[in-house]
């Protein structure tokens, strides 16, 4: 049985393993509250403002990017934290001091919600696939052979694993502890508690950390009472908030961009879920508001926009309620590590069919739309071409290589030179670090700069 005293461990790795910080900056905050602020003010957080959520190179400022998505996930997670800390302490946190829960729980959930996508590369999930594809196609060149053990982390490159690497290593201050977040926050950030090497045999669809961070992960698990294959309970809540945010809000953005209409969404959900109570509840409320708005002097676009705003309100409310009930109902199974790999709160809840239908709408009308696929292809080509050039900079000598190597972050180069991993692994990881740390526009700018010099 997991122990909340350990799961809410507010100690920091630097304080335990090195000399404690002498900086008196708490200002009345507890350690778990400070984590949110450290993440908020970190440079990689600001960079998410120029990283794709769904629509690459989007010029419409009202359409979400990776940063606005992360703030929305953080807000939803904080709300769930308030609910479980204030309304269900006796069911979830038996024996824990109430005052501590009311401060720690919402703060921790807000922090992991804000940080969960920090490691995602440019151009969204297509960026992940572009990195994976490049390493798979260049295994012989990079690793010396096909199916080399060092290749596993990179042909399965994942933004979740890169997030942990970023907050524990890459975001350097003046030591090797990254942002030096608390053990509780680090543990809850590990969405998939297995390595890429062990994921398939343990039943997980992907790994959640790289071999290079194995020692850090072992330390996190030891200090929080977790182990391989066992998630922190709050990871379930953060994952639910992420799923709610992207399924509902991606649909809103699809309609905001005039790719589909509110009526298209209603028809899609009605067709797929004619008898689902939550679907019908949300649609009844949203259609009632739509009918009310039709009496106002609104253009078709305005009618779509305001109708979707109300759909968003009702859909998020229903899904948050379902995720909360699912967490409370399953808390003993979660604390006993009895939840099967890849199971989540929403697919164990009454909102499962509604969530599935929304994902289907997003995929058909958004992710597979010609304009989206065209921009994703352009982003994929930029990433692949830039990786070709940066690999020369890392692996070869020459005037161009020396110039291009200096265009990689100084932090990343320092970490590369000090890494204890094998030479092939180190070089591949420097390339992955460099690409994933870029924004959409910076990647295009650097690509064009180097391409002009290389060509």
Image (tube, helix red, strand yellow):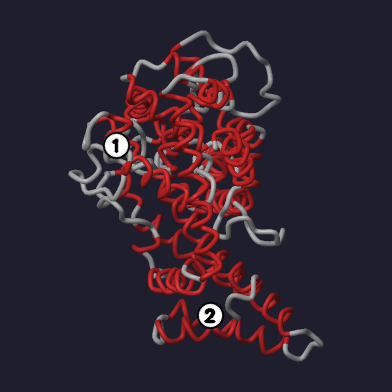
Within 10 Å of the Cα at label 2, are there few (<14), some (14-19), or many (20+) other Cα atoms? many
Q: Foreground residue, 450 or 69? A: 450
Give coordinates of residue 221: x percent, y percent.
34, 29
Q: Which mark is residue 139?
A: 1
Query: For the view shown, which residue lies furthest in the left direction?
Result: 201
Can you say whether 369 is above or below 62 in the image?
A: below
Q: Foreground residue, 62 or 450? A: 450
Can you say whether 53 is above or below 12 in the image?
A: below
Query: For the view shown, which residue lies furthest in the right direction?
Result: 297
Distance from Cα at disc 2 to Cα at disc 1: 43 Å
Q: Secondary structure at mark 2?
A: helix
- Which residue does the numbered mark 2 point to in the structure image? 265
Judge left or right: residue 64 versus residue 298.
Answer: left
Q: Foreground residue, 332 or 120? A: 120
Report the mark closest to the observer, 2 or 1. 1
Quarter in which the C terminus is drawn: top right
Q: Residue at x 32, y 29 (%)?
A: 211
Quarter in which the N terminus is drawn: top left
Q: Secondary structure at mark 1?
A: helix
Judge left or right: residue 176 versus residue 150.
Answer: right
Q: Residue at x 47, y 82 (%)?
A: 268
Q: Which quadrant of the figure has residue 303?
A: bottom right
Can you say whether 453 is above or below 155 in the image?
A: above
Judge left or right: residue 376 versus residue 151.
Answer: right
Give coordinates of residue 273: x percent, y percent.
40, 82
Q: Residue at x 47, y 47 (%)?
A: 89
């Amino acid at each position: 049985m997991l122990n909340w005293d350990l799961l809410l461990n507010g100690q920091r790795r630097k304080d335990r393993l090195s000399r404690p910080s002498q900086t008196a900056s708490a200002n009345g905050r507890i350690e778990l509250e400070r984590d949110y602020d450290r993440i908020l003010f970190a440079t990689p957080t600001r960079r998410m403002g120029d990283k794709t959520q769904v629509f690459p190179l989007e010029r419409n400022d009202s359409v979400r990017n990776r940063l606005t998505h992360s703030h929305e996930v953080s807000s939803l997670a904080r709300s769930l934290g308030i609910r479980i800390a204030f309304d269900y302490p006796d069911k979830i946190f038996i024996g824990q001091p109430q005052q501590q829960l009311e401060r720690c729980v919402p703060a921790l959930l807000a922090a992991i919600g804000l940080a969960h996508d920090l490691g995602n590369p440019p151009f969204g999930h297509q960026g992940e696939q572009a990195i994976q594809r490049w390493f798979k196609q260049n295994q012989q060149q990079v690793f010396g052979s096909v199916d080399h053990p060092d290749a596993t982390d990179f042909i399965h490159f994942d933004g979740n694993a890169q997030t942990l690497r970023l907050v524990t290593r890459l975001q350097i201050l003046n030591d090797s502890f990254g942002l030096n977040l608390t053990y509780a926050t680090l543990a809850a950030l590990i969405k998939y508690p297995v390595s890429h090497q062990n994921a398939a045999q343990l039943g997980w669809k992907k790994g959640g950390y790289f071999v290079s961070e194995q020692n850090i992960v072992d330390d996190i698990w030891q200090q929080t009472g977790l182990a391989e294959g066992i998630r922190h309970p709050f990871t379930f809540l953060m994952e639910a908030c992420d799923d709610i945010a992207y399924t509902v809000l991606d649909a809103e953005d699809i309609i905001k961009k005039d790719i589909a209409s509110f009526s298209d969404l209603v028809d899609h959900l009605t067709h797929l879920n004619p008898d689902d109570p939550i679907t019908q509840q949300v649609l009844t409320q949203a259609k009632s508001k739509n009918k009310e708005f039709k009496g106002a002097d609104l253009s078709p676009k305005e009618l779509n926009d305001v109708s979707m705003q109300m759909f968003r309100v009702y859909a998020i409310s229903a899904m948050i309620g379902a995720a909360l009930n699912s967490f409370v109902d399953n808390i003993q199974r979660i604390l006993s590590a009895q939840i099967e790999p890849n199971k989540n709160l929403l697919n164990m809840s009454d909102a499962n069919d509604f969530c599935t239908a929304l994902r289907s709408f997003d995929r058909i009308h958004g992710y597979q739309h010609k304009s989206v696929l065209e921009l994703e292809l352009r982003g994929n080509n930029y990433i692949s071409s830039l990786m070709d050039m940066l690999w020369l900079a890392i692996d070869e000598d020459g005037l161009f290589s020396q110039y291009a190597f200096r265009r990689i972050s100084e932090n990343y180069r320092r970490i590369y030179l000090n890494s204890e991993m094998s030479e092939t692994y180190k070089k591949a990881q420097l390339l992955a670090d460099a690409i994933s740390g870029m924004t959409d526009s910076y990647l295009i700018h650097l690509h064009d700069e180097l391409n002009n010099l290389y060509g």
